[in-house]
Amino acid sequence: MTTRTQQAGTPGAVASGAAVALAGLRKHYGEVRAVAGIDLVISPGEVVALLGPNGAGKSTTVDMMLGLTRPDAGEVRVFGQQPRDAVTSGTVGAMLQAGALLDDATVAETVGLVAALHRAPMPVGEALDRAGVADLARRRCGRLSGGEKQRVRFAVALVCDPDLLVLDEPTVAMDVAGRRGFWQAMHAYTETGRTVLFATHYLEEAENYADRVVLIRAGRIVADGSVAQVRAAVSGRTVRAVVPGATEPALAGLPGVTNVQLRAGRAVLHCADSDATVRALLAAYPDAHDIEITSAGLEDAFLALTGNPEEHR
Ligand SMILES: Nc1ncnc2c1ncn2[C@@H]1O[C@H](COP(=O)(O)OP(=O)(O)OP(=O)(O)O)[C@@H](O)[C@H]1O
């Protein structure tokens, strides 16, 4: 699996040109080690899912990225800026789980207030439209459902027209239709080349909407790559084929093969690198046929990589 993490703790790793650069990031809360050394570089235009079990350190990482929590060690840059500067300049927009909304303000007033704080906001109407809350513009925030509040928080994040959107579990409290609408809106936004980092528990959201998945366990990154790479890192892939004339030792010698079973000419090859295996298989056995390649789901990968978490010490 390709790993895109940077050299641990190197200040130079908060590299130029990156949308987000985290280097050697650590955070304790008393005895609890919430983040235990995270190095991560996100390029402009990437859509990245931060996945991990409860208490893995996702929110703490996001908070440090936004300047809401100060790291004990390490560095954060967002488009080359300190997190707080990036937030105040409107370079980054955030949608947090518990982002406060004023009960007595209407939706349009709420989004307008945030727009007024920024130098180059998008028109309030456009932010409401994009977030799918234009029909709620005159409703007081105190009278919104949980899912509607989430969409208003999305409009608040969008209105500063940020280059980077940071979303902490954005679809919590949304129903199926709300979730679908939310991701359609997100997709439209990312098509404009913006960078998005979202923390989620929903594996299918990572699978469907992220270019890249970063898996966190006990405050550390345990996998980083495309969905396909993260899946393959856990279990590899299985190649099944009918291979006339093959023997087990010959198949075991093909590149990328970790295990072979051969029965009645039908081979089952467990592979660390199925692309290399299939190329070599066809080169050595041009008559091989009925080839199938399967991989584990992201859920299998998630469970394998995030099981047995270490103590938070
Ligand atoms: N303000 C705090 N004070 C004390 N401990 C905290 C605080 N915030 C987080 N923690 C602890 O730090 C660890 C990481 O928490 P964090 O909220 O970052 O995880 P998470 O991956 O976002 O979890 P979840 O998926 O449950 O939201 C947990 O053990 C949590 O209890």
Image (cartoon, rainbow, N blue to C red):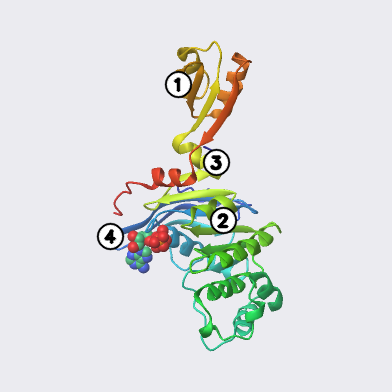
Instruction: Check contact, mark 3 vs mark 2: CB within 8 A.
Output: no
- Quadrant into which the C terminus falls: bottom left
Nearest to viewer (mark 2 / mark 1)? 1
Upstream in sequence: badge 3 or badge 1: 3
Camera sees residue 213: yes
Asked if residue 137 lies left or right of residue 4, the reply is right
- Write down the residue under mark 4: 31
Q: Amino acid at mark 1?
A: Val
Q: Nearer the viewer, residue 225 or 242?
A: 242
- The circle drawn on residue 260 is 1
- The amino acid type found where label 3 is placed reads Ala
Dividing the picture into quarters, in which one does residue 78 lie?
bottom right
Residue in the image at 59% along x and 14% along y: 284
Which residue is farthest bottom?
Answer: 104
Q: Secondary structure at mark 2?
A: strand
Residue at position x 53%, y 34% from top? Answer: 294
